[in-house]
């Protein structure tokens, strides 16, 4: 409108040349340059945000992958563990984890003596340098190897979270002034034991493979079990949402008559995709737990809820993929005598498969990062289950999910859990990035353009 | 074709697992976020020492937990509700209506509520009166109730620095809020004489109703943004204080003890909160912690009674146990609680 005004007659003596730019062209070019600059600025802001996010996450989270360990020789005293000497597993089981505390204390004192560390601390405070999980580790070992009672065995225990924080620089002598969990004298012993090589910081596989731990032992908490919870949920989502979603979209796209009923269905599918995920959680609680009596906190229920949530996404992307297959393919198939079903399953579906898979993977990635619907079906909380052994157990025994675990850690009092929450985010991000990369690669590799 | 097969197999798996889902074999707990750390410590040790699976402990606040507890009897309801306050008459009634009649009340110990602020900020020595004057909706000035005019702590008490009042207190779904209202605000209300003033003007059919109305008027807090309700956990309160150095937050003692590098604790009526001063009763703002067990579930859910007994065992909840190490003030009457749990004594004494 501004560039061209029909009312004014063109000036008679305008010299135009391709080499000299008129004012109007200059203005248009300037507009274009400015728009490009805006675009670049927008992308830079986006990238900067991403950079800040990634730097923050990795800066705070990488610490969680390392943990401080204490290597000790523990004498498995028969007098404490098996008074009868009969090595009867039932008798040995009767000694609770509290009964193992003296062994840990003894081992710690022995190590102090062996390395010539002078300290006025009592054995209880020395043993306080170790994680509370040490006794549980010891008991599990003894129950698995009762024949070794009476021997001295080398163990690698986790150090208490404050000691770990001290080696990671999170805890300093100044910051523990009012802390009753650790004292400066204990840190002196830590320094001496680090010099002696008893205490060392190394990569902690248990953070990736282990289960959750209580508030008293953040050092022992891991993502592994919740990762399995997420895995089993994704299995349910994949097994239910993919076939149902694909079948629904094939019918709607290829077979259903176009009338007001299918229009309503279409609008509603789009609506469902926009429903807040917590609504699906409420629905899951009402239908799957209260009405169908499925177990609480089970990944099966979580998977069912996430299936409901993912279905619209999969249906929409599948329909888009089916629509992208040109009608000439269908016509050709029908022309050589294929039935409608044959044309769909032999020709259209294989050509749409990359698009369907991409949509499914993106839907799964979305479901993987979802916490809100799990809140109401009991999957957010302290769920320190052991790794499930069978498929049925994995689906039914209580478990958490990765994002729920992160949320749970971020709520806890000990700052060590905060570090683990960030570490958990790194693991979750790696999963999401991998899934999305697979989706992009699949699309690039197999998608056909007409 | 593969999709057809996949669908068929998926449906069979779902059907098979659904039919297998008959019995729940883990104890299911929900409720107070204050009790959650203790419950998780016990649950973890329980899973390690017994052949039962580790109980599942969810949080969400005392009221939310008790509400779920009172939903009914059956495997799809929780077995235990953690609470940082005693169950209310109203809740017992709601429970009974849903068929939850025999409830075992278990007191696990005491917990202190502390007032803490940024470690680099000013130190405070509070009394309940200070808090009432700082946060109440209306305070008494010259014998009349007026809208709270106090803006800084110096307005409240000349001994305090002129720091703007900014308090982060637990939201109403937390049991901690009730203790804060009862032991701090109401105490301050009575100490300033405002309570009597309100009581004199209170309307009600009976003396009891008047007293209730006066108490309610006392604990109504100002809504001009000076006092902020925190519905989340203490970590949220801590985050608010970290971003606002003037803020003073309400925490559980155990939470403060885990974050002594970021928080400094204020004294209340001249007493520093520690497990010792709470145990002796010197520190005034403390409350008992409970959990409630559905008797109908004992014998149905494996490990339920064992879990309850283990929770209050001397080696767990006693003065040298892991709970008191974490910050719980051990109950001097623990042995009675142990007996009551062993006998499955229900509330109302009809055991």
Image (tube, rainbow, N blue to C red):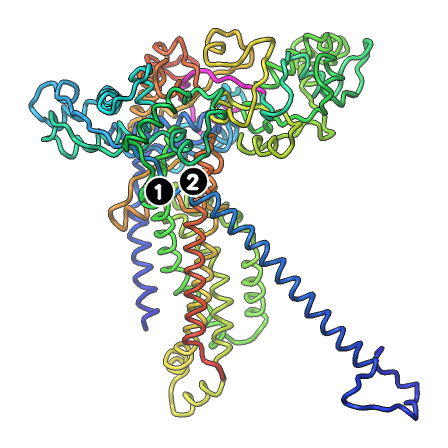
Label ID, residue B313? none
Quarter of image, res A73: top left
Q: Residues within 10 Å of mark 1 (few under 14, many from 20)?
A: many
Secondary-structure class at tag 1:
helix
Q: Is residue B102 left or right of residue B214?
A: left
Neighbor class of circle 2 (other Cα within 10 Å; few <14, some 14-19, many 20+) is: many
Q: Position of residue B73 (x, y in %)?
A: 40, 31
Instruction: Give the magenta range.
Output: B91-115
| Residue B103 among magenta residues | yes
Q: Which quadrant holds the C terminus of chain B? A: top left
- Answer yes or no: is residue B5 visible: yes
Residue B98 visible here: no
- Residue drawn where x is 89% and y is 86% of the image: A6
Q: Which chain is disc 1 placed on? A: A
Q: Residue under label 2, please give it.
A: A420
User: Residue at image x 50%, y 19%?
Assistant: B86
Q: Are marks 1 and 2 in contact (CB under 8 Å)?
A: yes
State which quarter of the image contains the N terminus of chain B.
bottom left
The answer to whether B88 is drawn above or below residue A37 in the figure is above
- Residue B174 or residue A187, whichever sits in front: A187
Position of residue B96 measured from the top left corner of the image (x, y, whole percent): 46, 25
- Let me know if residue A389 is in the magenta part: no
Q: Write down the residue under mark 1.
A: A207
Q: Residue at x 58, y 20 (%)?
A: B115
Return the residue nearer the eye: B82 or A444.
A444
Real-space Cα distance between discs 1 and 2?
8 Å
Q: Nearer the viewer, residue A20 or A276?
A: A20
Residue B203 placement (x, y as % from top left): 74, 14
Q: Secondary structure at mark 2?
A: helix
């Amino acid at each position: 409108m501004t560039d061209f005004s029909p009312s004014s007659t063109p000036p008679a003596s305008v010299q135009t040349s391709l080499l000299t730019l008129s004012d109007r062209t200059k203005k248009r070019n300037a507009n274009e340059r400015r728009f490009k600059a805006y675009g670049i600025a927008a992308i830079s802001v986006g990238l900067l945000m991403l950079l800040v996010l990634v730097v923050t996450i990795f800066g705070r989270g990488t610490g969680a992958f390392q943990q401080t360990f204490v290597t000790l020789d523990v004498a498995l005293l028969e007098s404490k563990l098996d008074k009868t000497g009969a090595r009867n597993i039932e008798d040995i089981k009767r000694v609770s984890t509290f009964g193992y505390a003296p062994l840990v204390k003894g081992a710690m004192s022995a190590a102090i003596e062996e390395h010539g560390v002078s300290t006025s601390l009592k054995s209880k405070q020395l043993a306080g340098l170790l994680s509370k999980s040490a006794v549980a580790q010891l008991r599990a070992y003894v129950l698995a190897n009762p024949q070794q009672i009476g021997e001295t065995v080398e163990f690698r225990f986790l150090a208490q979270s404050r000691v770990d924080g001290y080696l990671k620089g999170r805890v300093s002598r100044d910051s523990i002034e009012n802390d009753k969990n650790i004292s400066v004298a204990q840190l002196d012993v830590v320094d001496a034991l680090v010099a002696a090589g008893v205490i060392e910081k190394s990569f902690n596989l248990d953070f990736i493979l282990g289960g959750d731990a209580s508030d008293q032992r953040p050092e022992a908490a891991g993502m592994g079990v919740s990762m399995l919870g997420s895995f089993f949920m994704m299995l349910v989502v994949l097994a239910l949402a993919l076939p149902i979603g694909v079948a629904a979209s094939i019918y709607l796209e290829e077979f259903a008559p176009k009338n007001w009923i299918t229009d309503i269905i279409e609008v509603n599918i789009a609506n469902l995709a926009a429903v807040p995920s917590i609504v699906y959680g409420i629905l899951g609680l009402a239908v799957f737990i209260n009405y169908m009596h499925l177990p609480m906190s089970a990944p099966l229920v979580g998977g069912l809820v996430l299936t409901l949530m993912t279905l619209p996404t999969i249906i929409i992307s599948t329909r888009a993929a089916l629509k992208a297959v040109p009608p000439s393919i269908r016509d050709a198939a029908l022309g050589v005598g294929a039935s409608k079903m044959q044309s769909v399953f032999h020709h259209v579906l294989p050509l749409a498969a990359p698009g369907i898979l991409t949509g499914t993977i993106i839907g799964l990635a979305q479901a993987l990062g979802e916490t809100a619907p799990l809140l109401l079906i009991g999957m957010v909380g302290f769920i320190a289950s052991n790794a499930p052994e069978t498929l049925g157990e994995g689906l039914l025994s209580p478990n958490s999910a990765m994002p729920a675990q992160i949320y749970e850690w971020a709520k806890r009092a000990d700052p060590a859990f905060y570090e683990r929450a960030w570490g958990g985010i790194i693991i979750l991000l790696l999963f999401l990035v991998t899934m999305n990369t697979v989706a992009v690669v699949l699309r690039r590799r197999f998608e056909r353009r007409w | 074709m593969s999709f057809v097969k996949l669908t068929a197999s998926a449906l069979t798996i779902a059907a098979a697992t659904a039919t297998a889902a008959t019995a729940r074999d883990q104890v299911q707990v929900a409720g107070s976020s204050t009790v959650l750390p203790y419950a998780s410590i016990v649950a973890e040790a329980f899973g390690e020492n017994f052949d039962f699976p580790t109980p599942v402990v969810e949080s969400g606040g005392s009221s939310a937990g008790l509400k779920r507890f009172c939903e009914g009897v059956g495997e799809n309801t929780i077995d235990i509700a953690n609470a940082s306050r005693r169950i209310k008459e109203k809740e017992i009634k709601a429970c009974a209506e849903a068929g939850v009649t025999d409830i075992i009340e278990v007191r696990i110990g005491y917990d202190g509520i502390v007032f803490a602020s940024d470690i680099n900020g000013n130190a405070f020595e509070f009394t309940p009166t200070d808090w009432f004057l700082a946060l109440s909706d209306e305070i008494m000035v010259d014998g009349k109730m007026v809208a709270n005019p106090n803006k800084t702590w110096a307005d409240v008490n000349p001994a305090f620095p002129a720091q703007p009042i900014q308090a982060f207190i637990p939201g109403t779904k937390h049991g901690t809020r009730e203790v804060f209202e009862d032991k701090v605000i109401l105490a301050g209300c009575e100490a300033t004489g405002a309570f009597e003033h309100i009581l004199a003007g209170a309307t009600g059919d009976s003396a009891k109703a008047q007293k209730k109305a006066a108490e309610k008027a006392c604990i109504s807090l100002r809504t001009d943004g000076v006092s902020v309700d925190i519905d989340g956990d203490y970590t949220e309160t801590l985050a608010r204080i970290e971003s606002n150095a003037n803020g003073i937050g309400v925490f559980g003692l155990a939470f403060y003890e885990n974050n002594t590098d970021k928080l400094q604790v204020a004294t209340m009526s001249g007493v520093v909160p520690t497990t010792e001063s709470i145990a002796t009763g010197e520190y005034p703002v403390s409350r008992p912690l409970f959990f409630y067990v559905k008797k109908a579930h004992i014998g149905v859910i494996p490990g339920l009674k064992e879990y309850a007994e283990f929770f209050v065992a001397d080696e767990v909840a006693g003065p040298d146990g892991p709970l008191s190490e974490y910050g719980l003030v051990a109950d001097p009457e623990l042995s009675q609680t142990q007996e009551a749990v062993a006998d499955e004594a229900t509330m109302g004494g009809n055991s």
